[in-house]
Image (cartoon, rainbow, N blue to C red):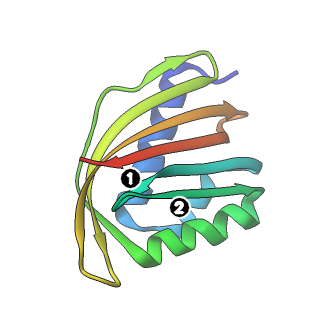
Amino acid sequence: MTDRRDTDQLLRELHAARVAGQLERLCAVFAGDAVFRIAGTSEGKPIAIAATGIEEIRTWLAMLVKTFRLTGYEASPSVIEGHRAMINWRAQIHSKITGAVVSTELVDLVEVRNGRIGSYFELFVPR
């Protein structure tokens, strides 16, 4: 069983790897059979990503790391109840392709299994 401190540390590692743009470090926090979803809107257009299993997740994470750089990261304290957690965070998301910078509000809903992320759902919206 994962305790609050372990779950909080797992979320910190997830975000540190994401901000650093380190693909292998990011993939390491996910269980092999994890479910991964991202949903939001950018410039009024809906965006949705869904993947199951680390190989599909790796493909999407590689695209995110290659396409975007994060700065100005700020997170609220995580809310942890049993094996579930929620964290609200903000960042400036820089497109490495267009150069655009978008201030973004994000919420991660996470379920932890055996010390790794088993389910990840991220919601985002520009601020």
Residue occupying the far top of the picture: 81
- Cα distance, mark 2 to mark 1? 9 Å
Marks 2 and 1 close (CB-CB < 8 Å)? yes
Under circle 1, the secondary element is helix
Residue shown at the point (67%, 61%) measured from the top left:
57
Question: Amino acid type of disc 2?
Answer: Arg
How crowded pointer 2 is (Cα within 10 Å; few <14, some 14-19, many 20+) is rated as some
The number of discs equals 2
The secondary structure type at the circle numbered 2 is helix
Q: The disc labelled 1 sits on which kind of residue?
A: Ala
Q: Position of residue 29 (x, y in %)?
A: 60, 49
Q: Give x and y (percent) for residue 13.
A: 45, 47
- What residue is shown with label 1? 16
- The mark nearer the N terminus, 2 or 1, is 1
Q: What residue is drawn where x is 61% and y is 60%?
A: 27
Task: Using the image, determine if residue 107 lies above or below residue 18.
Answer: above
Quarter of the figure with residue 26: bottom right
Q: Which residue is mark 2?
A: 25
